[in-house]
Image: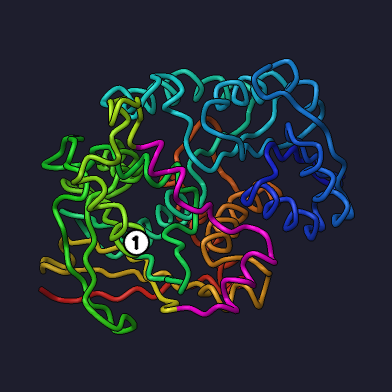
Amino acid sequence: MGKKVLVLGVGAQGSTVAQRLDEEAGVDEIICADYDPKAVEELVKILNKARGLSVDASDTASIIEAAQGVDLIVNALPLLFGKNVLDAAVAVKANYQDFAAAEGIFTGSLDDDWVEGIRYMRREYGPKFEAIGKLAVVGTGSAPGLICAATRVAVRELDSCDTIYNIAYEGVEAKRFQPFWWSPLTALSDMSEDAFAYVNGEIVRTPAFGLPVYRKYDYLDEEVKCVEHAHDEPVYMGLNAKEYFKGAKNIYFKYGGVGIRFAEPLYRAGLLSKTEEEFNGQKIVPFDFVLAHVPPAPKYKDEIKAILDEGLISDTGCMVVEAYGKKDGKDVRVETHIYAPGLVDSFERSGITSEMYITGQGGFLFTKMFVNDKYEQTGLITSDMLTYPEVDYYFAKAAELDITLDTKVYSL
């Protein structure tokens, strides 16, 4: 008998997963659920194995009712619903997957306690999923997610590891004003926070837009600047440094591109502050005012086509893992480059943006592993904790989607 999957949230990520699941021979039924009945209806009508439901994700009982008999719950909802979905998965004895780890819901903010939120999830929910013989995998988009699995590939080349850089540069730029190809709210929120890094064996806070690095790879037209950015990877990998990353002492996430160049001067001018202030007799929150003037990321085919018809300034980018350490007694640098379709190619293939492609497909590959029973584990893991057989399967299937890796080792 084939699998039954509940997809909660039918935005860009959830709808991508649902469409790919519709092609899977091992799936019998897809339940597409959201608070927006129109969005559900629009998705279900283009699928063969799907039915739609309206679910109130603020009510765990509503999720449990929708999830009866499912093998897997894919959580593509905003973070604040994460605990409810985890509890529902345990209640119905289903596997669980999300795209952005829900640890913040246990602490309420992206601050030092957020790290404890990850520990809490593992400590409290790991045993619950183990007890029912199921697995929860959190943080399974492109970053975190795809890049975490790629980091395992890079570190495999080393005997011991000292430093890891996860580097993401988004160089897709339209002629129209379009600074972000993903949620501006999430992007600007992340950018207005101090980041996390793993430095000398400890998880520390680092200054937003700080600690720049400069890289010039063969396929980039120029040297690019990438800076600190609040992201999950250094926290995940820092907690797992000894067991999964060969004793790495330093782990950073560096981000650059059009969005960073837009946001950094706003941040330095205080315009990403979320503190209410008075201006000309009016009370405003600078962050909210700026956000109101930033266009949303395009997600519909006609919106994307209109941008392409107007023309692009550039259609480039990179996602790279650099791992420094020892191999056969020598100091080396391992570079693992992740290649995926650009904006023009992604639209021609699937009618979506390159951001939607790599995030949605990267996330779906974790779902595919559930559908095809490729996980060897139970409990709760972050996406950097795949076993090597799981990593190899993941990238074998990624290659079929033209998401490929190129790993090289350089002597230092």
SS category of the residue bearing label 1: strand
In the foreground, 62 or 157: 62
**x, y percent for residue 313:** 42, 79
Q: Residue at x 40, y 60 (%)?
A: 150
Asked whether residue 302 is drawn in magenta, I would say: yes
| Amino acid marked by disc 1 | Ala
**x, y percent for residue 28:** 86, 47
Up/down of 349 relative to 28, above or below: below
In this image, 101 relative to 134: left or right?
left
The N terminus is located in which quarter? top right
**x, y percent for residue 153:** 38, 62
| Number of numbered discs visible in the structure rendering | 1
Q: Residue at x 51, y 61 (%)?
A: 355
Residue at numbered disc 1: 168
In this image, 282 relative to 142: left or right?
left
In this image, 307 relative to 61: left or right?
left
Span colored in magenta: 287-312
Up/down of 246 relative to 98, above or below: below
Instruction: State which quadrant residue 163 falls in.
Output: bottom left
The C terminus is located in which quarter? bottom left
Q: Residue at x 65, y 39 (%)?
A: 74
Q: Tell me the colour scheme of the image.
A: rainbow
Asked whether residue 314 is drawn in magenta, I would say: no
Up/down of 56 relative to 219, above or below: above
Instruction: State which quadrant residue 116 falls in.
Output: top left
In the foreground, 255 or 248: 255
Pointer 1: residues within 10 angstroms few (<14), some, or many (20+)? many
In this image, 209 relative to 11: left or right?
left
**x, y percent for residue 402:** 56, 74
